[in-house]
Amino acid sequence: MAIAFDPQYKNAYLALEKKLIEKATHLFEHKEYAKARIAYTEAIQFDPECERMYQAQITSLIEMGSTLHEQRKYQEALDLYERAIQFHPGNAFAYAEKGHLLYALHHFGDALMAYTQAMALDPNYRGVFAHKEAPFITQGKACYEHGNYQQALAIFEQVLQFNPDNKDAQTAKLKVLHKLEQIAEEKRIAEHKMRLTTNNSSWLYKEPFRYEL
């Protein structure tokens, strides 16, 4: 939302706006993205047209990241996506592109988190996840087989956020929940047995009876 200014101070406002833009540009060029974001935000308050400059800078970062991705310079591409997110944490496209890269590298857990964030910012990105659910289901099942039940549950729940009708994720989630309930019940039984054992053996530690002759 732009600030309402007194017309008689127009020149002073324009000078301040120019200084903010120069500051934001300088910070951006020196890769101080968090500070650059603040400077652009302040400039936008003076002139909403500055929003276009801000968006152009974000787009340039993401496009450079995409180019590096295509060149298989994966770490450099990931660094640029991270910078874009730091520069504009509310940009769903940056998270989606980060998700694509991580997915291509088979880092499915991290990719899923990036996709989830993209969808949280813009529900239209639900379609980005289409046809990419199978590897996450596989990863969740692998977590289950290795006894990482909470991690498996988190993966299946995230898949269901994207596609509530995914039958494999529904079935797998129920299986994990059943296993967690089973473990909790076994723990309760073991603790109960331990209390009984402790109570039954406590007499061994009492002072022996003394008989007066």
Image (tube, rainbow, N blue to C red):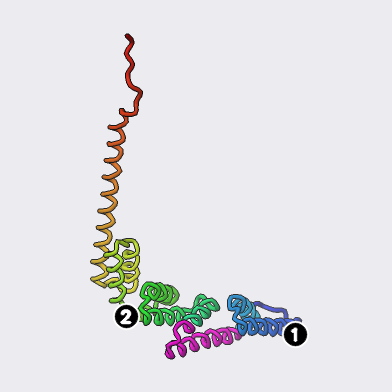
Q: Earlier in the sequence, mark 2 or mark 1?
A: 1
At which x and y percent is residue 74? Answer: 44, 84
Q: Which residue is most to the front?
A: 213
Q: Give whichever of 103, 198 is nearer the camera.
A: 198
Is residue 27 rendered to the left or right of residue 164? Answer: right
- Disc assigned to residue 164: none
Task: Mark 2 vs mark 1: give the one in front.
Answer: 2
Above/below status of 198 relative to 158:
above
At which x and y percent is residue 45? Answer: 63, 78
Q: Helix, strand, or loop for circle 1?
A: helix
At which x and y percent is residue 49? Answer: 60, 86
* Residue 107 highlighted magenta (yes or no): no
- Residue 141, quarter of the rendered image: bottom left
- Disc assigned to residue 11: 1
Above/below status of 64 relative to 107:
below
Q: For the residue carrying disc 1, how many other residues have a C-alpha within 10 Å: few (<14), some (14-19), or many (20+)?
A: few
At which x and y percent is residue 5? Answer: 69, 79
Residue that mark 2 sits on: 130
Amino acid of disc 2: Ala
Which quarter shows the N terminus? bottom right
